[in-house]
Amino acid sequence: MIRVVKRISLKEPVLIAVWPGMGEVAVKAGLFLKKSLDFELFAEVENTKIFPPQGVIVDRGLVHIPSIDEGSFYFYKRSPKKRDLILFLAQAQPPLDKSYEFGRLLVEFISSYKVFRVFNFAAFPQAIQHTQTPGVWVSATHKEILEEFSSYNLKILEEGQISGLNGLFLGLAKEKGLKGACFLGEIPFYTIQIENPKASLAVLKVIDRYLELGLEFKELEEKAVFLDTEINKLVGYLKGEFSSPESSPLSEEDIQRIKKELERFTKLPQSVRQNIEELFKKASQDLSYASELKKVLDEWGVYKEYEDRFLDLFRKKS
């Protein structure tokens, strides 16, 4: 269910919906918007039974079922001449087989607010280097939306698919008569598990221009520079290369510091872990799910981590 905590009246609001995914592109962009603008909470998703816990939390020897943040709706009222904003922010995606149900719940709710446009963000793995400025791709519900962004130097996703809730949400919104688009920020294939502030920044600049928000990006830009620097150091060390002839090899202390910093960015989102566990459970009962599981493991670059468990599925059957 969705519990309304504050009754509001909005003028042709634009909805931006975000949740975790590759490179944390969408959710970090959403958190940046929430921090930068004066958003207020007005509704919460709760008790849907769509997000089953995958384990328990142990505290001082005692176990507890963890509470799951299913998502919250925030609003931002602007000047009379500009459209208001709604931000849906979730810290997890539902299991794959529940994405359609969850997407319908969200679309049914927001459609009552006479939303003008629906936007969401995603990551788009490409054969680029982490030092490059990422491009932004777009896929829209209607041709007129593509025309609205024709001067934004975006790349149109001519064919293919947008997996998970990102694609389903936009498709369900279209079925409800809403118009919008998904903006996909490019990330290197080898960094899909690393937070990518550059890609978040790229999609935010599109929204900033379209909505005339006047956002200040200095903090995000500094974070992007820091992360590039740390990745460069680690890559240089692994290749046996260093920045200049005068530089000395990294000390063990340097290496551990860099790894520790990068470790903060290289964890799989909890929602992805949950999806993987759900697919393992299904594949153990029905091997037809193995191909879907393998696809998810490959997309996130974690097949090696799960390889033994994956192969065990077939050994047990044989």
Image (tube, rainbow, N blue to C red):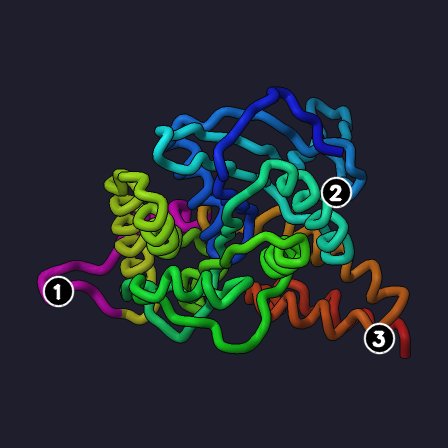
Label 2 with label 3: CB-CB less than 8 Å: no
Q: Residues within 10 Å of mark 3 (few under 14, many from 20)?
A: few
The reply to whether residue 266 is in sight is no
Front residue of this view, candidates 175 and 246: 175
Tell me the mark number nearer the camera, choosing from 2 and 1: 2
Residue 169 x/y as whole percent: 63, 54
* Amino acid, disc 3: Arg
Quote the CA–CA distance across marks 3 and 1. Answer: 51 Å
- Furthest toward the front, the residue is 81
Residue 212 x/y as whole percent: 31, 43
Residue with the mark numbered 3: 315
Q: Residue at x 49, y 38 (%)?
A: 13
The reply to whether residue 250 is in sight is yes
Q: Is residue 220 above or below residue 77?
A: below
Residue 311 x/y as whole percent: 76, 73
Residue with the mark numbered 1: 244
Q: Quadrant of residue 264?
A: top left
Earlier residue among tags 2 and 1: 2
Question: Residue 252 in magenta?
Answer: yes
- Furthest toward the top, the residue is 6
Residue 267 x/y as whole percent: 53, 50
* Amino acid, disc 1: Ser
Quote the CA–CA distance across marks 2 and 1. Answer: 50 Å
Question: Residue 86 in magenta?
Answer: no
Q: Residue at x 71, y 53 (%)?
A: 99
Front residue of this view, candidates 226 and 134: 134
Front residue of this view, candidates 43 and 304: 43
Q: Residue at x 28, y 70 (%)?
A: 240
- Numbered mark located on residue 51 in the image: 2
Q: Which quadrant does the C terminus fall into?
A: bottom right
Q: Residue at x 68, y 34 (%)?
A: 45
